[in-house]
Amino acid sequence: MTYVIGHKSPDLDSVAAAVAYARFKNKMAGTDIYEPARAGELNKETHYLLEKAGIKTPKMPDSLDGEQVILVDHNENSQSLDGIEKAEIVEILDHHKMNFSYDQPIEITVKPWGASCSIIAHKFFENNIDIDKGLALLMLGAVLVDTVITKSPTSTDMDKQMIEKLSEIAEIADWHEFGMEIFKVRSSLEGLAISKIIENDAKEFDLKSGKFFINQLETADLESVKEKESEIMEEMKKLKDEKSYHTVITFITDIINEGSKFLVATDDKEKMEKALGKSLDEDVYLEGVMSRKKQVIPMLSEIFDK
Ligand SMILES: [Mn+2]
């Protein structure tokens, strides 16, 4: 038996690639020795798509020690499940930079495409092997997520071609809409406590004016966050008072439209309006702003760190 396995903290592409490539290898060899596996807990969109595709969750081995493995969607030991140093790696299929050396010649497929599932889909088509509807749906989802619905700079023409072909098999009429559906599942705040939301991805910064707490959320659907905004604001104000912050910010990044909505609780409204270039009495949406490190902090430093 040979495991086909992706990286730790598996994303959709990593799990879908394991499922798809195990199936490809079994069909090519006319065997069932290739078994898809996963290297960690599944995220929300992976759960969602496996269920929608009617595909069972790959098992998670305790260790790869002594096992035969095919690595997909990664090639670095540090990203592999424990025991990889003592596993026999028989093949690699990936779309990341190579950081791999091995004492044996093995088969390696690496392409600079947007998703591992694009490379695997191409292999199916090249070899005239059928992809069933469920598998096509899973692979399509993986390519759409990894390429941010083809908007990522890593997305290539080949990814687009694979998206078109997989959509047809999966009977998805509008792949853009299907991509949005997956991103909505991924960024859903449903069931999350507000206290968790405001600490979703938070960092503290000491500026000359005082301590800043800056939290970022990602969404494919700003509208769906809107109904929680007042609750989020309340909780931010509480946090600001409790911890004596100068400013608490939650900015919600719309990954599709590439901009961020800012929720702000601050001691210095006037200066904050100057820093953001917007009135805090209205919705603050900053077009093109997506990075805390590269955009938000410099904007604030300009005003609050002098
Ligand atoms: Mn990937």
Image: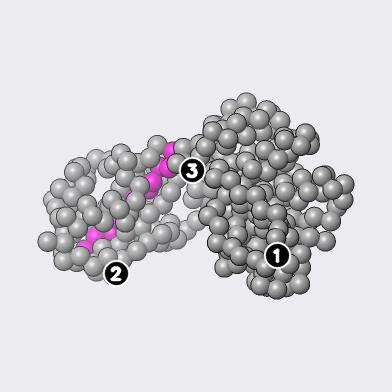
Relative image position of residue 281 (x, y in whole percent): 21, 43
The kind of secondary structure element at disc 3 is loop
C-alpha gap between disc 3 and disc 1: 31 Å
Judged left or right of residue 107, residue 235 is left
The kind of secondary structure element at disc 2 is helix
Which mark is drawn over residue 104? 1
Three-letter code, disc 2 = Glu
**Marks 3 and 1, the one that precedes in the sequence:** 1
Residue extending furthest toward the right: 30
Q: Are marks 2 and 3 in contact (CB under 8 Å)?
A: no
Relative image position of residue 305 (x, y in whole percent): 16, 62
| Nearest to the observer: residue 194 or residue 6 | 6
The kind of secondary structure element at disc 1 is loop
C-alpha gap between disc 2 and disc 1: 59 Å
- Image quarter (top left, top right, bottom left or bottom right) of the N terminus: bottom right
Q: Residues within 10 Å of mark 2 (few under 14, many from 20)?
A: few
Residue at the location (57% across, 37% down)?
A: 159
Q: Are marks 2 and 1 in contact (CB under 8 Å)?
A: no
Q: Which residues are magenta?
A: 246-256
Relative image position of residue 257 (x, y in whole percent): 40, 37
| Nearest to the observer: residue 221 or residue 77 | 77
Q: Which residue corresponds to mark 2? A: 242
Q: Which residue corresponds to mark 3? A: 154
C-alpha gap between disc 2 and disc 3: 42 Å
Would you say residue 195 sits in the magenta stretch?
no
- Image quarter (top left, top right, bottom left or bottom right) of the C terminus: bottom left
Three-letter code, disc 3 = Thr
Relative image position of residue 54 (x, y in whole percent): 75, 44
Identify the coloring.
Answer: one colour
